[in-house]
Amino acid sequence: MKKLTANICRVIVGVLFIFSGMVKADDPIGFGYKLDEYWDAFHTPFLSPFSLSLASFMCILEVSLGIALLLGFRMKLTSWLLLLLSLFFTFLTAFAAITGSPKECGCFGDAISLTAWQTFFKDVVLTGLVLVIFYLRDTIPSLFSNAFRNLLLTLGVLAVCAFTYYCYAHLPVWDFRAYKVGNNIELLRKPPAGAKADVFETKFIYKDKHTGKVKEFTEADYPWKDTLNWQYVDTKSVMVQKGDDAKITDLFIYDSNNRDVTDSLLLQHNFTFWVIMPDINLTNKNAFTKLNDLVKACDKHHINLIGITSSDYNDYDTFRHNVNAAFPFYRSDNTVLRTMIRSNPGLMLMKAGVVMEIWHYNDIPTWDEVAKQFSIK
């Protein structure tokens, strides 16, 4: 019975660790952003430069431990590492749940969105399963011969390392974000059909004339006739039920005169290239060798190409001259731009609000490649 219990826990925990690690390895930059939120919550912003490296290491470690557990590799070491990691995750999610920061813990990347409390309870259950593995580790058999088991683990670790690096140097293989290829951004900025609206309740605030205490009443019981005992103070509206939001609520793009041009850019029916640069100071300048060639081709074929950044005018105007970026710049929120594409600069091809394609700066296409792919003449 003990052996069966241990093996069931082994499969559940091993698969969960591999899945959790892989969906984060798919987007190591995004996981790094999530770690930045933790550093802000812990008031340790000096750790931010290490976020990407730590995020990549954690992804690889999770998958490696999952593989090691399924193979029964050195169970004493593996069970100790699993226990320490589970306790660490439980502490982090407990902190997030209690303090409310960050609101989402990112344990499954963008693939599965869980609240801080949901993640905490998940980690409590996970830690319980790991404790079972820890105490019954001697009953868990190793699979295959030592040499073949070591080979499988080595290949697994190398594979997840290569996968993590590929997703960092290019773009996520599985895109779970709202700005993925094929999505209509304009439609996603609106609540879905049949969406429930927010429900509000009116509260009436009165002061007891005898005691001076202030009390809130609803429309059903407020003492508007009892002027001898109660004095009206104020009225407020309180949300009692949250409605359905649009999937994209924070995308706003402004021109150099601070005018909102979001709709006019999204509703352009011709192809438009967006060069996304969240922070000009961190933008890879080498990418502009290919980008500027694309700009010239776009001018020749009457295709719009714009830049969008969160940096202020002085910074991006200086940058434009340094890299010879001969296209107009617009401004948007840094977090939104980092969500749109995990690359700085990143390139998006838009048409009538639809994301037609996205490219990392390492994969910027030539005009001929784009024209062939989308039949542009």
Image (cartoon, grey):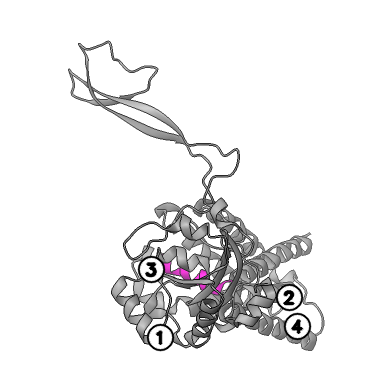
In this rendered view, identify the residue nearer to me: 244 or 225.
Answer: 244
Whether label 2 touches label 1, CB < 8 Å: no
Calculate the distance from the C-alpha at mark 1 to the C-alpha at mark 4.
47 Å
50 over 272 or under it: above or below: below
Quarter placement of the N terminus: bottom right
Query: Which is more N-terminal, label 1 or label 3?
Result: 3
* Residue numbers of the magenta segment: 27-37
**N-terminal of the two: label 2 or label 1?**
2
User: Which residue bears the numbered disc 2?
Assistant: 72
Q: Which mark is residue 323?
A: 1
User: Does residue 165 sit above or below 62 in this rendering?
Assistant: below
- Relative depth, front residue between 87 and 372: 372
Residue 122 seen in the figure: yes
Q: Earlier in the sequence, mark 4 or mark 3?
A: 4
- 48 on left or right of 230: right
Q: Residues within 10 Å of mark 4 (few under 14, many from 20)?
A: some
Q: CA distance from mark 4 to mark 3?
A: 45 Å
The residue under label 3 is 310
Residue 152, label in figure = 4
- The residue closer to the viewer here, 22 or 304, is 304
Q: Quadrant of the C terminus?
A: bottom right
Q: Quadrant of residue 139?
A: bottom right
